[in-house]
Amino acid sequence: MYLKAGDILSGNEGRAYTTINGQVEEAFYFRNVEAVAEKQKSAVKVLNRTGAQHKANGWEGTGSATIYYVTSVFRKMMLEYIKTGRDTYFDFTFINEGKGSTIGKQETILRDCNLDSVVLAKLDVDAEELDEDISFTFDDVDMPSLFVTPTLGR
């Protein structure tokens, strides 16, 4: 049994959306994105054991993305915070789906995202294309659709 090459997703076949103040827009400007949920753990010592055990006691969601320098949407959010102190929370939706794949699609919604840092201005005489890095946190996640087990080859 082996994994069929047709079930391995291409990195450029995904789709991304932002939902800001109820307005959904396709986020065509993403080059790459990664969101990670990391458990927070505490060490627990008990009698008659030399090593510590570990117990999960929470989690934290963080993300980073490289996007083409073609949108001001994140700069507008940061500027609003700088000028007024009003922060914006928003959702990111990411869909992975390959044409011809047997695994279906996976949809991930990162809820209550909040920006950490944003490039406010950028020039680069050596760059053929301008891009920028953004980082963010998220407070919740939903996955309305998950991949199914691939059809294996023999």
Image (tube, helix red, strand yellow):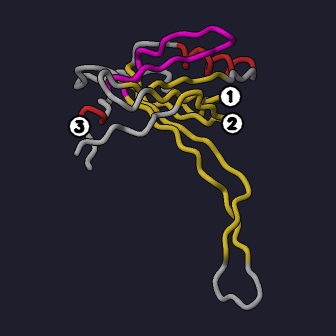
For label 2, the crowd category at 10 Å Cα-Cα, with few meaning under 14, some 14 to 19 and many 20 or more, is some
Q: Residue at x 28, y 20 (%)?
A: 129
* Image position, residue 12 (x, y; %): 32, 24
For label 1, the crowd category at 10 Å Cα-Cα, with few meaning under 14, some 14 to 19 and many 20 or more, is some
Secondary structure at badge 3 equals: helix
Residue 5 is tagged as 3
Q: Residue at x 37, y 20 (%)?
A: 68
Which amino acid, by three-letter code, is at mark 3?
A: Ala
Q: CA distance from mark 3 to mark 1?
A: 36 Å
Q: Which is more foreground, mark 3 or mark 1?
A: 3
Answer with mark 2 or mark 1, whichever residue precedes in sequence: 1
Answer with mark 2 or mark 3, whichever residue precedes in sequence: 3
* Image position, residue 90 (x, y; %): 65, 22
* Image position, residue 144 (x, y; %): 59, 27
Residue 139 is tagged as 2
Examine the image and state in which quarter residue 57 appears: bottom right
Q: Give the residue at mark 1.
A: 112
Q: Residue at x 33, y 21 (%)?
A: 130
The part of the chain drawn in magenta is 12-31
Q: CA distance from mark 2 to mark 1?
A: 5 Å
Which amino acid, by three-letter code, is at mark 1?
A: Asp
For label 3, the crowd category at 10 Å Cα-Cα, with few meaning under 14, some 14 to 19 and many 20 or more, is few
